[in-house]
Amino acid sequence: MINYILRRLLYVLPVLVGVNILTFLLFFVVNTPDDMARMQLGDKHVSQAAVDNWKAQRGYDLPLLWNEEEEGFAQASKTIFFEKSVGLFVFDLGASDNGRDIIADISQRMWPSLAIAIPSLIFGVLANITFALLLIFYRGSYLEFGGLFICITLMSISGLFYIIAGQYFIGKLLVLTPISGYAPGMDAVKFIILPVLIGIVGGLGSGVRWYRTLFLEESAKDYVRTAKAKGLSDLQILFKHVLKNALIPILTGIVVILPLLFMGSLITESFFGIPGLGSYTIDAISSQDFAIVRSMVFLGSFLYIIGLLLTDISYTLVDPRVRLD
Amino acid sequence: MLTLLWTDIAVFALVIAGMYGAWASSKKEHLRRPWGQVFESTVGVVSLTMLLVFILVGVLDSVRIQHHDTLASGEVSEHAKTLSLLDIVLTPIRTRVEKTYSMPFAHTAYAKEMVADSNGQSQWHYPRLVFAVSHLAYPEVEKTSDIGNKILMGVAVAVLVWLLLILFITGIRGQHPFKQDTNGLKSCVWTLLAVFLLLGATANLAPYYHILGTDKVGEDVLYQAIKSIRTGLVIGALTTIVMLPIAISLGLMAGFFRGWVDDVIQYLYTTLSSIPGVLLIAAAILMAQVYMANNPELFTTLEDRADMRLLLLCMILGVTSWTGLCRLLRAETLKIREMDYVVAAQALGVKRLQILKRHVLPNVMHLVMITVVLDFSGLVLAEAVLSYINIGVDPSTYSWGNMINTSRLEMAREPIVWWSLAASFVFMFTLVLAANLFADVVRDAFDPRANN
């Protein structure tokens, strides 16, 4: 087991290097720091001195890959690639283009993101499973047909619509919750309810269908027929046997996205004005802060890979038949 | 004279490819049978008909010619504009631009203004719109009956056209489409009736009213919503075209050749899929913006720029979305390469590329088909979200995402302006629902597991 995890961790490294090189290519080679400086400074006829100054302040004034002016190891280390990209591996994300410490920002903004993401995930999964089981229970009836049609309809509505409609009807007309905003501590609850609710409703369509196929696959298996022949009721079979066995793919499906919860939801957070990592990223994109976008790309990929690793491990934990070696 | 933008060429190429695909699969038994199943199901035919209507609008919007507009004064404007056929069809609602917001079917503006009356005194009231309802002298009393009349007239013409179509079909087939054991044609004909009715009523009303109101600069919202159809279709379809060759070739190679080829390809798609999609798109679009800002000479007109950005967006979406299908195809190829017929072909000395082409590719085509149809609706929805974060299509391009994006501020106004938002959502919903329903039917027909 330990052996396996170690081997997988070694496999993570080249992937991270790949991500790193890709972002480096995107951010520094396709467009040189000079281009970025001109874009940020706004004017096309900006003086070279201003560009140099902008670059020097942010440490973009070094050569890209190889510094001819330095001696020895510094030839490789006094470069943009080394200072801006290699640092990511030890989570030295550096400062954003407007001078703030990225790590400090992230550790502070992580909590609001989690406050939205965790309840959305838990209640969302519970709601999806409940409705999926109901659909299976009423298999072949008009209720199932209607339920499936509602699912497709829910899936076809843009996520933006749920947010705008929810904010308008619940926040503005009924005044049940604040339209947007956030407060630290326990006050956060009233700000969280609406985004969580919308997150659950928005994911219902595809979620229910996905869990339904899982349960359908499971209930086509032999042990279900045996249980039925033994005289168990449909309800007992569904909850005692099918649900239990289907939990394996459900659990592993959840484990994959667990680490990514940190990243927050871009759209929800910016609509509801929640100071999480999602709105942090959006703000960075719209203010064209390349340092933050670069850090978030790296962080996101790192968390995704951790998620994959956790999935593999959780397989062995929940299903004794799976052996990793 | 015909003018072509890059995405226009892509649209035509797509239409031709689609026709060729339909022709080719009609000759192959293993593809004809599931398609036959699709054409027999009511849901499949209804959704396909709706999709085809959308595609027709999209294609009409891609044929661009130099056109001299007829101005409101009756003169023909001197300098020619590049307009699509759709623009020319929609001339009555394209050219009648009001001053600012107005409600659907309104004859006055949405906000009060200082208006000088006949006595020369200014008064604070709702000014009449310049174009809408200008044919009625007393809109307050006449409007409802006028709208009713126009709808009736439009509906009557629509029914007439539809009956002609039925006659035409009956003439060709020798029997009328309702009395048949084939379910498909019947559903298609009924769907067309609904489409015709809607079109007839709209076409008769649109020259006199702003059916869906006007936006901030007074442009007709219906026009914007219809123009957005092309953008949605291009994003959904073009992305698929970018993604398919990469996914198919790499997926098959990884599964078939194994060894280091497999390792490299697996590494490639793990790396790409580990980067959060939105961030990769954002990064690429940011970089493209920098590039365009620094090389303005490459993009002479606003239209060129917007078109380039749309094309680029499709490419980036394609590059980020091939990994899923590739993984699927690799797994399937791994299974197929152990099949007896592949082993037999290898033993007989058939070249490896030939085996891939003849024996493996046709057997994974159903997966490709299912993925293409399933991805389409997701991409249309993604466009709206991306435009909202300003990393979608160019702000000057008509798209549902851009409409939603601008109407965010309108929702905060008092009283709120809801029609722009509602129009874009309804149009987007119709397209995506049709695509989703069609995808469901296609999957049921092609998925071998669903058959038993």
Image (tube, coloured by chain):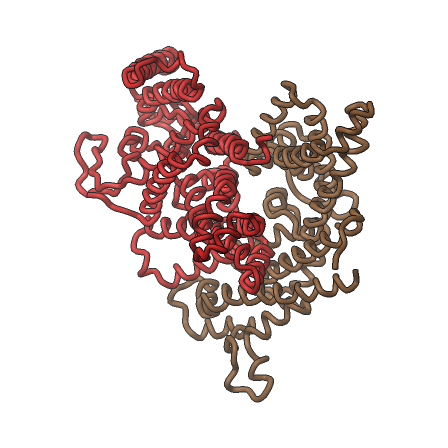
Comparing B343 with B334, the one in front is B343
Q: Which residue is at a point 36% across and 20% down the rendered structure image?
A: B196
Among the chains pictured, the one given brown colouring is A
In the drawing, does residue A223 fall left or right of residue B413? right
Q: Where is A157 relative to B292, above or below? A: above
Q: Which residue is at a point 23% across and 30% down the rendered structure image?
A: B72
Q: Which residue is at a point 25% across and 43% down the rendered structure image?
A: B82
Q: Where is B441 relative to A24, above or below? A: above
In the drawing, does residue B271 fall left or right of residue B129? right
Question: Which quadrant would the C terminus of chain B be assigned to in this image?
Answer: top right
| Residue B197: percent from left, percent from top | 38, 18
| Residue B175: percent from left, percent from top | 33, 13
Among the chains pictured, the one given red colouring is B
| Residue B130: percent from left, percent from top | 32, 27
List the single residue furthest toward the bottom. A71
| Residue A250: percent from left, percent from top | 72, 42
Residue B118 lies in quadrant: top left
Instruction: Count up the numbered dots.
Output: 0
Q: Where is B279 relative to B436, above or below? A: below
Residue A151 seen in the figure? yes
Residue B422 seen in the figure? no
In the drawing, does residue B435 fall left or right of residue B123? right
Comparing B276 with A4, the one in front is A4
Question: Which quadrant would the N terminus of chain B be assigned to in this image?
Answer: top left
Comparing A315 with B66, the one in front is A315
Q: Which residue is at a point 62% across and 28% down the rendered structure image?
A: A173
